[in-house]
Amino acid sequence: MADFSRGLAQCGARVIGLGEHAAPSLPAAVRRSLSDYIRVPSLVDTDSVLAAVRAHAFSTSIERVECLWEPFMGLAAEMREMLDVRGMHKEQTELFRDKEKMKDALDAAGLRTPRHVTAKGTEAIRAAANTMGFPLVVKPIAGAGSAHTHEVRDEMSLAVAVADVGDYREVSVEEYIEGEEYTFDTVCANGRILYENIAWYRPKPIVGRNVEWISMQTVNLRNLERPELAAGRELGRRVIETLGFRTGFTHMEWFLTPSGEAVFGEIGGRPPGGRSVDLMNFSNDFDIYTGWAEAVTRGEFSQTAHRRYNAAAIFKRARGQGHIREIHGLEDLRRRFGEHIVVEDLLPIGAPRRNWRQTLLSDGYLIVRHPQLERTLEIADAVGTDLQIDAR
Ligand SMILES: Nc1ncnc2c1ncn2[C@@H]1O[C@H](COP(=O)(O)OP(=O)(O)OP(=O)(O)O)[C@@H](O)[C@H]1O
Ligand SMILES: [Mg+2]
């Protein structure tokens, strides 16, 4: 977020921050980018936030509202409606938030989504599961970070899912799509795609986020022309067109089935998290933070995407609980792959472990890059197996 703010300022925008924190406590990079700051007691209190912004808008004209964080996409939309500025309004924002609405809209356009229904409560979920048959996914309508998302292959895992999501949360019950999972990310302006990106999750998040020993990888792909990606890329373009996305970042997830079919997963009207935006920069040797800012302020993307590297982030989870005590294998990896390791961001010795279920970054990560995909995967896998962090 700090880099996106910087990008806007660099593109000549006067950036007014809106947040809960005291201005002096903001990161220096953010403070430098802001020409003004509106502090509110709580971003969740929509009415008071709108009032504060309205009061500010009397003295300064506000031409755009940008929010790149999922929980406040709806708030940003309300602000746009109130200020009568362009960008996504409430109804359209819903298409990027509500996993049922987005799929209904895509179904109507004939795009391939997993079969899906909504359900609330034990009985309704069980009835939906019966109609649809295993394997299934049960997940919240507006979830993030794979929280409360369950792979259901039998009665036992159905019982676990039902118990976890409870009786009051509305969920999607979906056909489980086998295969690999990819992203399709874009920067758009005025409905035109100005930059396209595809990353490959290894393994699928639903697997990696539920098994602690796995070091999840996001591999940003250099070559989007690989034949197996063509269907997903085409799907991605049509999704953006169908949902009428105009300007900003998009982040879609899709599945490539063993038979080569591309199936929609979900889409957000925002950039991906988990350092994926940095991976784009490492793949292209450009600055997509200003690239995005240029798109939203001037409708252009003037930088060239060189696509020189595949770039992979490998997220590490410590063994054991408590505080980080030892890091093994890093020296050896540096010796073997030094020039290809571009970021080392591990928790320092002595730091408390992070809660692996609540963070994508886990206890730290490395970013590696290489022009060849095979070699990138080899290095990323070496980081996965040979780098070990011990906590006690
Ligand atoms: N229909 C499906 N078939 C197979 N896997 C699925 C399906 N739906 C979701 N998943 C798996 O569960 C993960 C989380 O689901 P989804 O992306 O919809 O939720 P989320 O909580 O918004 O995730 P995140 O914020 O981590 O992207 C997906 O990345 C995918 O691995
Ligand atoms: Mg997702």
Image (cartoon, rainbow, N blue to C red):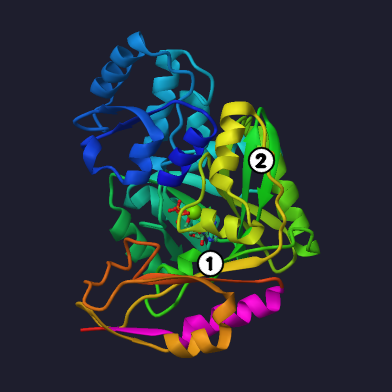
Q: Residue at x 48, y 81 (%)?
A: 384
On screen, residue 291 versus residue 56, left or right, reads: right
**Residue that badge 1 annotates:** 204
Q: Amino acid at mark 2?
A: Val
| In the rendered image, the vertical position of residue 367 relative to residue 27, given as above or below | below
Is residue 387 found inside the magenta-colored segment of the image? yes
- Tag 2 secondary structure: helix
State yes or no: residue 46 in magenta. Answer: no
Picture coordinates of residue 245 (x, y %)? Answer: 61, 32
Q: Position of residue 64 (x, y in %)?
A: 48, 23
Q: Which residue is mark 2?
A: 239
Badge 1: residue crowd in 10 Å (few <14, some 14–19, many ≥20): some
Camera sees residue 352 = yes
Locate residue 316: give its quadrant.
bottom left
Q: Mark 1 and ligand 1: say if the CB distance to the nearest ligand atom is below 8 Å.
A: yes
Of the numbered discs 1 and 2, the one sitting upstream in the chain is: 1
- Which kind of residue does numbered mark 1 sit on? Lys
Q: The magenta stretch spans which residues?
A: 372-390
Q: State whether label 2 is within 8 Å of ligand 2.
A: no
